[in-house]
Amino acid sequence: MLNWTKYHILEKIKDDRILLWNTFLGKGITLVGNIAPICESEVSGVWSGEDSKAKQILQSNGFLIEKDQYDVEGKLISKMRSETVYDDSFMSITIIPTDTCNFNCIYCYQSDTIHNMSKETADSIIRMIARKKTLRKLHISWFGGEPLCNKEIVFYIMEGINRVCKERGIVLIADMTTNASLLDLPTFIRLYDLKVLNYQITIDGCKKTHDVQRPLKSGGSSYDMILKNLRDIRDNAKGRFFKIGIRTNFTDFVDNQFAAMKDTLEEEFSNDSRFYFFFQWVKNWGGNRISGIMDRLLSDDEAISHYGRWMDQMAQTSVRTGDITLIRPCSGLCVGCRKNSFIVDTDGSICKCTTGMYDKDYRDRVVIGKIEKNGLYKIDKWKEIDWLSMDADQNECEKCAQYPICLGMPCPYYKIKHKRVICNKKTDYVCKIILAMEKQGHIQEIRI
């Protein structure tokens, strides 16, 4: 007898059409035809039907597994968690070249400080990477503040890292979170040559709403600057391997005006798979600025339901909507949960959480070490263990379809600060993404 894997999501689209997503394998299929036997067996958890094409398809795609496999698949994910958390061949470093920013976003949790990374600290980061003899794959993320407010240090460090990786045969992946106001074409091309290929930028709705939520610190408009840079990249960047995720942080204000942004996204980025849209909702990320809109914030469940309809609307356009990287296995694991994943602050401090770095009451729990000039670093193991340990109920986690995505290790900073584990077992957000991918033809369709 074959069992349905616990780690799947089924969405009925029409009477003859279902979408299936395997969270353990990070892939999905759309089945068209007589889906009734499939839906019935999914509810029961076992396949009781005949040896049909549907059964073969479900089995070959990992949705149906043998009973002995079903009994131990939770252990496989525990193994994946252990290998991921303690993998010494991998290192992920989020670098803060500056904590200054040229924006004054209404929900930003960071303080208005001005610290720029020195060349001396930059050299220590490069040396730290060069010293790690077991390193085979390196992930670099650029964050801030606005990282491009100190772009020369970004270029300097990436040149050094590329040199080390080339000499050692290390696979390098790099990305950047930027407001894109300073991401002009020459800057983008140079970063592209240095293997910074993935970007997250934020456009909060149309010009009217964006400029209210994300104004320049000088008080001027930032919207036109961002659109100009993205158009220049779209029209003149020859590379096909970069990805720019356009993120919208929803509030009720953005929601009421989002139709205008939808039209803009269609006009600017239709049929260009290098650009894609996704959304988040404004939460209380800390700091003082959020106090002005606290009464307008929604819970996660409310926000997904309320704002998620724009994901549905965008999925009906030719702007790529949703991305598998948001829901692939391990993608929900906080960077702070990995032994060799660090945030390096402007002074070389090794931290575990960008939000906690700016929380004066908890910064001491977030900073776990510091890089010395020679590239050596020492980690405070007593602090580190709070970030690496699984404190959720593993028996409950093993029953959850999203277990392969988060590995049972939800936000460790929340756990440290509030002394309890938070978890959202609902699959609503994942469903929004996979349904958008299905509508745009990015999931294989099979007739049964």
Image (cartoon, rainbow, N blue to C red):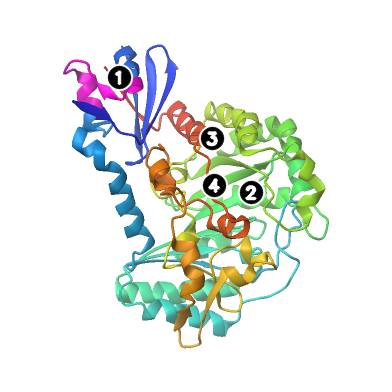
| Region in magenta | 42-58
- Which residue: 43% across, 62% down? 338
- Which residue: 42% across, 51% down? 241
In the rendered image, residue 87 lying in the magenta stretch gets the answer no
For marks 4 and 3, the one nearer the N-term is: 4
Residue 336 is situated, as x and y percent measured from the top left of the image, at 49, 62
Q: Which residue is mark 2?
A: 202
The residues bearing labels 3 and 1 have C-alpha atoms spaced at a distance of 39 Å
For marks 1 and 2, the one nearer the N-term is: 1
Q: What crowding class fits label 4: few (fewer than 14 Cα within 10 Å), some (14-19), or many (20 or more)?
A: many
Q: Would residue 174 be seen by someone viewing this image from the given angle?
A: no
Depth-wise, is mark 3 or mark 1 nearer the camera?
A: 1
Amino acid at the residue labelled 1: Ser
Amino acid at the residue labelled 3: Ser
Q: What crowding class fits label 3: few (fewer than 14 Cα within 10 Å), some (14-19), or many (20 or more)?
A: some
Q: Label 3: state its secondary structure.
A: loop
For marks 2 and 4, the one nearer the N-term is: 2
Depth-wise, is mark 1 or mark 4 nearer the camera?
A: 1
Q: Which residue is mark 3?
A: 270
- Please tell me which residue lies in front, 88 or 375: 88
Amino acid at the residue labelled 4: Gly
Q: Label 1: state its secondary structure.
A: helix
Q: Is residue 77 left or right of residue 441?
A: left
- Please tell me which residue lies in front, 326 or 51: 51
Q: What crowding class fits label 2: few (fewer than 14 Cα within 10 Å), some (14-19), or many (20 or more)?
A: many
Q: Label 2: state its secondary structure.
A: strand
Q: Which residue is mark 4?
A: 245
For marks 1 and 4, the one nearer the N-term is: 1
